[in-house]
Amino acid sequence: MEKTKKTILVVDDTETNIDIMLELLSDKYDVVVALDGKSAFDAVGDNEVDLILLDIMMPDIDGYDVCRGLKADERSINIPIIFITALDDEKSIEKAYAAGGDDYVAKPFKPLELLARIDTQLKLKELINHLNYISSYDEMTGIYNRRKFFELGEKRFAQSTNELYAVMIDIDKFKNINDSYGHPTGDRVIKIVAKTVSEYLSHDAIFGRLGGEEFAILCNCPSPKSVSENIESIRAAVEALELLSDAGESIKLTISEGVAKRNSATKSLDDLLRVADVALYEAKGLGRNRVIF
Ligand code: GH3
Ligand code: MG
Ligand code: MG
Ligand code: MG
């Protein structure tokens, strides 16, 4: 079930401060408490935290270090952090923002102002999440869009050696599908192909829609044989789909795939995709509905 209340983590070493926060926040938010820096990291790991209220002066790890640590971690980088502290000199405020803090409230604070600042940070976070989503995913299919595919692909290329494969996929004679059954059916076919391919991929494969009815996969695999088998299974699965047009006619659907394996001549992701694209082109030339490795 989707959770209705947002979760706020309150990090403070003084119990009275915690009690004040619980009193102020508990009606509207789920509140999680940490009494020191180490527990703050644990709490972020264990809960889906939406925002953090962070004290600065604490024994062991101070608030600045907690903030730096959380903002350096991919998993917590987008959680807004509001410092809430008795320190109200300019240097401390500057240091808090330099550590990655999103806002700063000095104690004693005005309760309604704090609630408003929390609300603002939560709205900003939602907006950022939404922007991240729409800049990364293809609206029609829900898989990575071209931009995200290349962003993740470049990273993967930099990390992987020869066990990296690229697969280019293109729907065969797709223009005919549009022409015969209409554009909305064409859209439906694109979605079904994306879903079918997804079902055959391991969780760490990078799969994106590069445009129109063209897709690409990047995957690591120790054995070329298992890659070939997997890619062939995808082709066969698409061919076996039983699709009907809106008028009830059976739609014949196939794809062609070109596969490339990284080797010493592959200097970039573009090189690898180019080789896969040449293989795809060959698959088309040989009559489509096939895999060329
Ligand atoms: P081939 O087997 O050689 O790939 O033939 P093809 O007909 O698939 O050729 P091509 O790749 O040139 O055609 C792609 C067509 O896909 C052209 C374009 O009108 C259509 N198309 C591109 N994007 C979309 C989309 O989002 N939805 C629909 N329905 N059609 C699209
Ligand atoms: Mg303190
Ligand atoms: Mg095409
Ligand atoms: Mg095509």
Image (cartoon, helix red, strand yellow):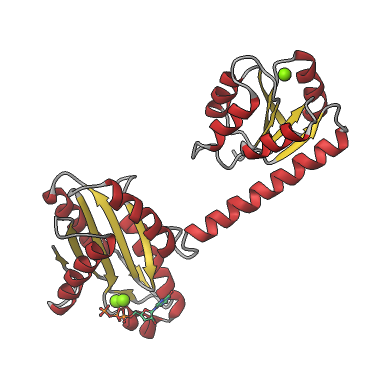
The location of residue 24, given as percent across then percent down, is 82, 28
Residue shown at the point (22%, 59%) measured from the top left: 267
Q: Quadrant of the N terminus?
A: top right
Question: Along the line of sight, which residue is nearer the eye, 41 or 63?
Answer: 63
Q: How many marks?
A: 0
Residue 152 % position (x, y): 38, 53
Ligand 3 quadrant in view: bottom left
Residue located 86% across and 32% down the image: 111
Residue furthest bottom in the image = 179
- Please report the residue visible at 14 percent of the width from the left and 55 percent of the height from the top: 264
Residue 118 lies in quadrant: top right
* Res 291 quadrant in image: bottom left
Residue 56 vs residue 174, the one in the foreground: 56
Residue 163 horizontal side relative to residue 2, left or right:
left
Identify the image quadrant of the C terminus. bottom left
Residue 42 image position (x, y, % from top left): 54, 23
The answer to whether residue 276 is above or below residue 177 is above
60 left or right of 204 in image? right
Res 240 seen here: no
Q: Is residue 267 left or right of residue 141?
A: left
Q: Is residue 40 at all visible to an observer of this figure?
A: yes
Considering every residue shown, the one lying at the far front of the view is: 91
Name the one closer to the observer, 241 or 261. 261
Residue 246 is situated, as x and y percent measured from the top left of the image, at: 43, 75
Whether residue 243 sits left or right of residue 80 in the image: it is left
What residue is at 28 percent from the left and 71 percent from the top? Answer: 170
The vertical placement of 282 against 201, above or below, is: below
Position above or below: 60 against 130: above
